[in-house]
Image (cartoon, helix red, strand yellow):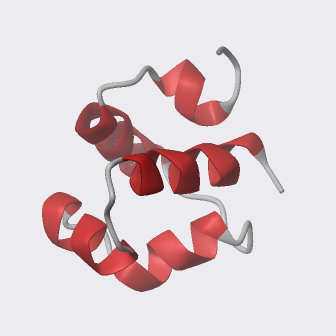
Amino acid sequence: MSKFSERLKELREEKGLTQTQLEQETGLTRSAIGLWELDKREPKLGAVITLAKYFKVSLGYMAGLED
């Protein structure tokens, strides 16, 4: 599993959100979020930026480049 997948799921669960709730909050689709968490698809940069802003973390953290 990629660091991005792990971090996305961890951040979502820390906020107590379902994938559907994250979809509603960010405008990203639940199916995409699910595929990213399962590491079956890689997000485009715009989606990573949206998630980093939403969770108030850096792009480097989302990508697993920094702790």
The location of residue 21, given as percent across then percent down, is: 23, 72
The location of residue 35, given as percent across then percent down, is: 60, 76
Q: Is residue 22 left or right of residue 52?
A: left
Nearer-the-camera pick, 29 or 1: 1
The location of residue 8, given as percent across then percent down, is: 53, 50
Q: Is residue 25 left or right of residue 36?
A: left
Which residue is farthest top? 66
Q: Is residue 66 left or right of residue 50?
A: right
Q: How many marks?
A: 0
Q: Quadrant of residue 34?
A: bottom right
Quadrant where the image shows the N terminus: bottom right
Which residue is farthest bottom? 31
Nearer-the-camera pick, 4 or 45: 4
Q: Quadrant of residue 22?
A: bottom left
Q: Residue at x 73, y 66 (%)?
A: 39
Residue 21 higher or lower than 46, as above or below? below
Q: Residue at x 39, y 24 (%)?
A: 57
Quadrant where the image shows the C terminus: top right
Q: Quadrant of residue 31?
A: bottom left
Q: Residue at x 47, y 44 (%)?
A: 45
